[in-house]
Image: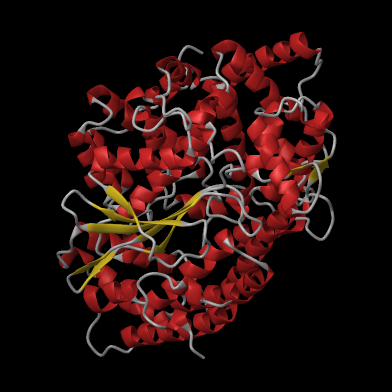
Amino acid sequence: MHNPLLKPFEQAPFSLIKNEHFKPAFVAAIEEARKEIDAIITNKNAPTFKNTIAALDYSGYQLDRVSSVFFNLNSAETNEEIQKIAQEVSPLLSEFSNDITLNEELFKRVKTVYDQREKLNLTVEESTLLSKRYKSFSRNGANLSDDKKKRLREIDAKLAKLKLKFGENILAETNKYQMHLTNESDLDGLPEGAKEAATQLAKSKEKDGWLITLDYPSYIPFMKYAKNRELRKELSMAFGSKAFKNDALDNQENVLKIANLRHERANLLGYKTHAHFVLEERMAETPEKVTSFLDELLTKAKPAAQNEFYELEQFAKDLDGIERLQKWDGAYYSEKLKQKLFNLDDEKLKPYFKLENVIAGVFKVAEKLFGLTFKEVFNVDKYHDEVKTYEVYDDKNNFISLFYADFHPRPGKRGGAWMTSFKSQFRKNGEDSRPHISNVCNFTPSTATKPSLLTFNEVTTLFHEFGHGLHGMLANTTYPSLSGTSVYWDFVELPSQVLENWCYEKEALELFATHYETGELIPMELVQKIKASAAFQEGMATLRQISFGKLDMEWHAKNTSKIKDVKVFENKAFEGTQLYPDTPETCMSTAFAHIFQGGYSSGYYSYKWAEVLDADAFAYFKEHGIFNKSIATKFKEHVLSKGGTENPMTLYKRFRGSEPKIKALLERAGLLSV
């Protein structure tokens, strides 16, 4: 069979790939990778860094390429057939991964090199790779007895399937729900753009009236603006009860199985809990440090959050006689209060944030900071017509990266926003192989009368994901496994979160925030209001993030084998961080994809952890000018280009001159006076 995935390819050949190519490509690429591993094991020469550690890192290149194409499509352009293939190939990949880490002969060679590390005169990057490679064996069962190795394989295969199933259920639930409205009064309060999008969605499904779904561009405007409280409640309950209905798409059993298998796996490897296992390779180091960090933030945020909630409840009572604020009231009355306090309405801002202008703006910011230029190209193969492609060059006209951008929701695309790569950066045989990076988002699409106009929140999301993108694009390392975003998980959000800060600055907004019809620059009074409102309800927002971090730690820093009821367990975890009354029909855990499907298990705290880093880093820029070239160059050289080649705190201190201080975050969030 002619299989485009099994030929060497630079750009992913999307138009040539058919679903039936994937499984044979995985099977063949795994076989090829096995041969490469066997060549390392059977090498008659004594183990060296080059013939063992480096060879191992460069092995499996074709398999990595096939995997990146397939799993990115499974997130951004999936269908039932692709999901079925994912269920079939995930255990194969899990088994192959275990075949490497549990191979005694291979581990022996790695250990030989590791034991000689003091005498080898390695570079910092080589030393990091050696340590990482040795740990990847010891932390994944290389020292276990045969029966325990067998059990580890079983656990990993089960986890691979369960995590996929968890995500499939959420996507199916999201796609299944529709609120079909035929009475226009039910849309009272909704902005014209949101109404038009709802009409367009209904037409696409051959229905009259308006359709509201659980996709963010549809869900959020309705929750924020719709006057009809009962409909807001219905939508909120549908969103909050995803995969929590005791039916075929229910995730309660999957949650318990995933948590228990992770705990068993950690115990098998000699760790007290899954969190102890994960955090050994994080800046935070231990569950105790994470809990202490979250508790320190909680003492600052909780009084502020309670005051803000009381103010919001009083406002809703005075305005509409609401006696008890519920979850479906929060966004609606927060928006009303924000408008009252700051006279700032997302709808007034949206005309200044046409998607194409914001893209041009983030490119301009990258140019001013890092000397990058982005050239749209039309000869790159794409997986969907909506995807835009760009070639990225530095100020010396060197090719830096290929960049894919995919911005609107579709039925085959999971919710949220993320950065990923189709090819990592690395150096081999004197050649610098440049990366192929992708940003995927779910922004409000254009309508018959309006282009895609972003809310300010969507603007910050675009900058956030682009920050991750820069981390991938500017990678400058030798080994693929240390490149780009391959860093400690609680460091990975620094480049993304720090870039959001430019969205609030006059100098940056002036580059792109122009009215899509008149070309008028965003009025400075609106810029001042954006800045003034930045800390609005920051206590509540911080408390919410802390609650998610604590729920994550409850699931992963304890023995979960005795848990019978997911909802009861979750409510206990949320004690001390809850502001709204509980709704028994909803559950966070069953749709908490970050920790049960994505890579954030025992790591959700890292958003707030990275906020400390980003606030401290941006304070440095503010001190010397937000487009200060020398500070931007330091950030590029010591953070963005270095990937995981050194300890992140070492890199951060090299950039900043000192460890980060929590003060900048508390100051920015308006929590210092609390």
- Determine whether, in the image, residue 112 is placed left or right of residue 352: left
Residue 12 lies, with reference to residue 302, above or below; the image says: below
- In the image shown, does 395 or 6 lie closer to the viewer? 395
Residue 57 x/y as whole percent: 33, 71
Residue 427 lies, with reference to residue 275, above or below; the image says: below
- In the image shown, does 575 or 528 lie closer to the viewer? 528
The image quadrant that residue 226 belongs to is: top right
- Determine whether, in the image, residue 480 is placed left or right of residue 326: left
- In the image shown, does 150 or 253 lie closer to the viewer? 253
The image quadrant that residue 316 belongs to is: top right
Residue 253 x/y as whole percent: 76, 58
Residue 635 lies, with reference to residue 30, above or below; the image says: above
Number of numbered tags placed on the structure image? 0
Residue 632 x/y as whole percent: 24, 37
The residue that appears at 53% across and 36% down in the rendered structure is: 454
- Determine whether, in the image, residue 596 is placed left or right of residue 627: right
Residue 512 x/y as whole percent: 38, 33
The residue that appears at 38% across and 36% down in the rendered structure is: 498
Q: Is residue 60 visible?
A: no
The residue that appears at 41% across and 85% down in the rendered structure is: 32
The image quadrant that residue 75 belongs to is: bottom right
Residue 453 lies, with reference to residue 596, above or below; the image says: above
- Determine whether, in the image, residue 657 is placed left or right of residue 332: left
Q: Is residue 450 visible?
A: yes
